[in-house]
Amino acid sequence: MRCEHTPHSLPAFPVYSLGFVDDEKLVLGGGGGAGRSGIKNKLRLYRSKGKELELVHELQLEQNEDAPMTMAVHPEASEIVCGINSAEEKVKAGENQNCRIYSLEKDEIKLVKSTQTLLPDPQSDDYQKVTTFSPLYDLLAVGSTNNQVSLLSYPSLSPAAPPFDIPKDGGDLFDLDFLDHYLMVTGSKAIYVLETPTSKGSAERGSKEKKSKKKTSSEKPSGSLVIQQKLPVPALPGVASGVTSTFRSVRSVTTKDGDLISTTVFGIINTTPPRTASKGAARKAFVCSWEVQKNSSDAPEWKLRKTRAISNKAVTVFDVSRNGKLLAFGSSDLSIGILDSRSLAPLLTILNAHEFPPTTLRFSPNGSKLISGSADNSIRIVEVPGTLGDEPSRIWAMMLYILLALLGVALAVGLRREW
């Protein structure tokens, strides 16, 4: 199925993070980083209607601060949380306010609160790499390039648990997401499912906390992040021995069909051929889906459902639509694609979507748009048809394919008879 998609050039604004405030408003984070590139680091609020993109407000960060490398949106509170390193002199002084809340009220971006999750280290260039909210928006998980994960209460930003360090055999941190009241920490070599301090007794308590707007900054950690499960990278079909397989991203989605509630986890796995492989050897990327059954007392049960190759080069970004029907990815081959979440079959591919590999990618809340960004100073807006991925459209596509095949056979038979 064909989709309308429009590139938008953003001069002198490499894009590294984005988030939708609602179906029309989005925030972009980007810039030249902490170096002396001359490119300012900024947060920008845009309004997107159809193909159009209108700049609503822009906040330029302080001189020598880093670019917003990661972002999570709290749509109900009209707030965003960003990972932004302070200026170098503040970092060296141990005053790196790297985790920041910004308000978007009245269409203006304003700093509300900030905290430090990175340990002071004058010799380190670590930064906040991943930011995500819990389903009830009462917890915030942030992960950094030092492979440390912090769980914070929201909106106080006080620690909800002591930091969690990925074990050495888990590889480098790549992604974070919540699985109900569990936190999934994705390292390159393993997924760690952590029990959060609030998970005991959880949903009801979380609902009460959500209704209560009064939170103090004096809250103390209520417990540790305990490893409940460790899932290694699964075996991949058609992958030869000697090829290294690593996780890139893992996301969960819970859907409801009548009284049936189901949870699926989707994971991206990139592969690297051995050094002895030929120069042009494929670096295939795969998507996997797991059915997850959550028990009241035991850790969730994971069952690998499907695995499918989706790109001949590494995937750099990944997202799942809120209704769980569509998956989207950006690849280092400069393309972006949309998959059906049930079959993992490709529904749309846009080649050469950017000049550099995509750095960020998000569906709008209602799934009608997919926007990707890149360090090439551009974003691309994809208009996603409401029928994309629906069962009727798949059936019609299959019927059309069968009719065309039958027509081809009939023409071939007719030509034979003439000869």
Image (spheres, rainbow, N blue to C red):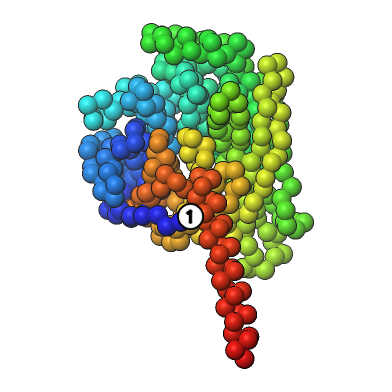
Q: Is residue 95 visible?
A: no
Asked if 53 appears above or below 127 in the picture, the reply is: below
In the orientation shown, which residue stands out farthest toward the right?
A: 241
Which residue sits at x=59%, y=75%?
410
Specify the amino acid type for callout 1: Leu
Q: Is residue 272 visible?
A: yes
Counting every numbered tag in the picture gives 1
Crowding near the residue tagged with mark 1, few <14, some 14–19, many ≥20 C-alpha atoms within 10 Å: some
Element type at mark 1:
strand
Give the left or right position of residue 87, taking residue 170 as reference: left
Tell me residue 150's x, y (percent): 53, 25
Asked if 198 appears above or below 165 in the picture, the reply is: above
Tell me residue 132's x, y (percent): 48, 30
In the orientation shown, which residue stands out farthest toward the bottom?
A: 419
Q: Mark 1 points at which residue?
A: 348
Tell me residue 387's x, y (percent): 45, 46
Which residue sits at x=68%, y=59%?
273
Give the left or right position of residue 91, taking residue 108 as reference: right
Please name whichever residue, 129 or 186, is drawn nearer the observer in this view of the structure: 186
